[in-house]
Amino acid sequence: MSAVILDGKALGLRIEAHLAQRVATLKNSGVEPHLAVVLAGDDPASQVYVRNKQRACERCGIKSTRIDLPNDVSQEQLMRVVANLNSDESVHGILVQSPTPNGTDELAITETIDPSKDVDGFHPTNLGRLVMGQTDGLLPCTPAGIIQIIEDANIDLIGKKAVVIGRSRIVGMPLALLLAQKGIDATVTIAHSKTEDIEGICRTADLVVAAIGRAETIQTDWIKPGATVIDVGINRVVDDSRDSGSRLAGDVDPAVSEVAGHMTPVPGGVGPMTISMLMSNTVRAAEILLN
Ligand code: GUN
């Protein structure tokens, strides 16, 4: 058997085409959706991510402003930049690219962002709303994108077993809450580095989501035949057969596609959907302000 490949890139582009229509409606009402991205430091991966976010803004017709700050930016300077964006009425979404430089407190910066402009969905107010079952607000982008992929493929999780590997505040924890919410109704296990018999637990699952950040860790014999496998990993690994000397690898061994029923590719699966959900949150933030 060979898995149906869940094409996040194609789905993301479809979603963005709909968003472009909503952006046009907002502009007709005199509102130009506007995302401000703060990039502190010179992390090469962050440079690529931010460029991809700006390109998505262009596709949707969203205005984007990029604020570059040096690697030695102080906590106070970063907080001041966020405070200025909070009070700038032309800005609907604020994103501070992670990781922020050594010596800065990312959680404190997140808490400084106005929750109504928190398009990453990481502010305690927005995460708290999610815990309370209120899923109509600004949801964290990667978990929201995974739910969209599952829904678009008509994968029914009611009463089914889902295993989320990874317990980060950005992916694992909020995704577990979304999968367990009313309407999706999965029975969710959160597995992590201390979990005993993680392979055995995965083998019982109808859905496995891998968000651990270690290349090609999930093996074929971890997966129940026909299960859905979502790969959140983006790992750069050495590959001497390529001119660049490296390639991108997910957290899941590609051979898993021989047993899974559905599987996301890397690249082209969860990554593009994360960006499309950021666009969606920015449009939503602008619409909420208007209404
Ligand atoms: N760094 C890697 N992914 C993300 C993301 O989704 N949001 C932010 N702010 N930083 C990131």
Image (cartoon, rainbow, N blue to C red):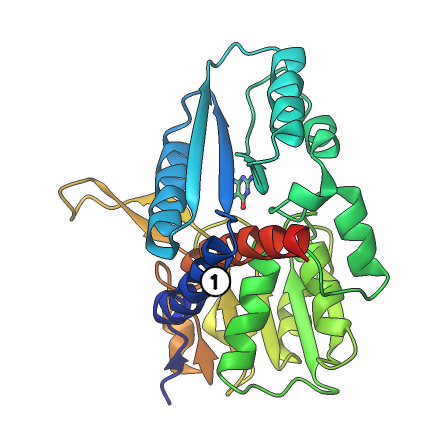
Q: Is mark 1 within 8 Å of ligand 1?
A: no
Asked if residue 257 is positioned above or below residue 177 in the image, the reply reads: below
Q: Foreground residue, 142 or 251?
A: 142
Is 75 left, or right, of 154 in this rendering? right
Q: Residue at x 66, y 15 (%)?
A: 75
- Judged from the image, the secondary structure of the residue bearing numbered disc 1 is helix
Q: Is residue 133 left or right of residue 9?
A: right
Marker count (numbered): 1
Q: Residue at x 56, y 83 (%)?
A: 224
Seen at 36% across and 30% down, the residue is 44
The three-letter code of the residue at mark 1 reads Thr
Give the residue pinned by disc 1.
Answer: 25
Mark 1 packing: few (<14 Cα in 10 Å), some, or many (20+)?
some
- The correct choice, above or below, for 17 with respect to 187 in the image is above
Percent position of residue 76, x then y: 67, 12
Which quarter of the figure is the N terminus placed in? bottom left
Which quarter of the figure is the C terminus placed in?
Answer: bottom right
Where does the image place residue 41, in percent across and percent down from the top left?
46, 20
Q: Residue shown at 81%/56% (left/top)?
A: 129
Q: Is residue 113 above or below residue 228?
A: above
